[in-house]
Image (cartoon, rainbow, N blue to C red):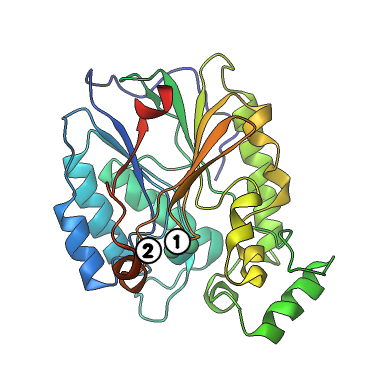
Amino acid sequence: MTTENRSEAQPERSTPTGGRLLAVSDLHISYQENRDLVEKLQPSHPGDWLLVAGDVAEITTSIEWALGLLAERFARVVWVPGNHELWTHPEDPVQLRGVARYEHLVERCRRLGVVTPEDPYPVWEGPGGPVRIAPLFLLYDYTFRAPGTTTKEASLAAAYESGIVCADERMLYPDPFPDRDSWCRERVRLTEKRLAACDPDVPLVLVNHYPLVRQPTEILWYPEFAQWCGTELTADWHTRFNTAAMIYGHLHIPRRTTYDGVPFTEVSLGYPREWRKRGLPDPLLREVFPQTAG
Ligand SMILES: [Fe+2]
Ligand SMILES: [Fe+2]
């Protein structure tokens, strides 16, 4: 799939005035309680956009159900894949692997009118805008290494030793790449070119399943898990590119932090066992704009 020759000069379609730019991730609708919550999600204004930062579900029909429902309700839905969408789950009738699975999901999204990382980056012209929304698919490359290790092999070995191993190792295939880190490096290369080609005068909202910097992973209960949470290759993107906000999920630790003056917001819902304990994020759909502009 080629992404290199697309023009980022124009948004695809005009936006109704007003509305908010909202974000959520990690809906994990294979849990019925989460599915019930998604069924209730509604825009508060006909111009509301929704950014969905990955981990909707594992099964293709479930992913389509949720994104289709949201696309009917919100003026625009922008999706990036999480690791769960990329699993080739034994219960999914779609048994495509790696790049072929990702491309299949992109195709399904396009049929639903959902914007993917393969589409031109749309421009939010509503309150707080204009900002260009850049949905990113970058994966991870094991460079957020386990404590005391300096190579991927040692980092993985430390994880296996502690028993903290991401299920991606069993279900997220990198085909046709030899490994997930090679796939990640190619995604970083392609994405960097696209971001560099964007008009620097229009600030970016970078949306990725993983944080672009390592710091948010420093509060993980199991530090070995960080190696499945991003890449050092993007550590300076929020300062190199004109970034108004960075939206991510995956960690299931909803919070907002600032790095070099750029707000990073973790917008996850998470598993029912997690949100039952700490309470639902309030509001569940986090406001990116106009709040960030204020
Ligand atoms: Fe998740
Ligand atoms: Fe995830």
Q: Would residue 47 be found to the left or right of residue 159 on screen?
A: left
Determine if residue 140 is in view.
yes
Residue 243 drawn above or below residue 270: above
Quarter location, residue 16:
top left
For the residue pair 18 and 109, the one nearer the viewer reads as: 18
Using the numbered discs, state the Cα–Cα distance from disc 2 to disc 1 in whole angstroms: 5 Å
Labels 2 and 1 touching (C-beta < 8 A): yes
Q: Is residue 50 left or right of residue 80?
A: left
**Quadrant in the picture for the C terminus:** top left
Find residue 49 and report its horizontal and vertical position in percent. 29, 34
Which comes sooner in the sequence, label 2 or label 1?
1
Q: Identify the mark at residue 270; answer none if there is no mark.
A: 2
Asked if ligand 1 lies within 8 A of label 2, the reply is: yes
- Badge 2: residue crowd in 10 Å (few <14, some 14–19, many ≥20): many
Mark 1, secondary structure of its residue: loop
The residue at the point 21 percent across, 38 percent down is 74
* Amino acid type for the residue under numbered disc 2: Gly
Q: Amino acid at mark 1?
A: His
Circle 2 — which element? loop
Indicate the position of residue 118 as horizontal and vertical percent values: 48, 41
Query: For mark 1, does the 10 Å Cα neighbourhood hold few (<14), some (14 to 19), or many (20 or more) residues?
Result: some
Picture quarter containing residue 222? bottom right
Vertical arrangement, residue 193 with respect to residue 27, above or below: above
What residue did someone put label 1 on? Answer: 252
* Mark 1 close to ligand 1, CB under 8 Å: yes
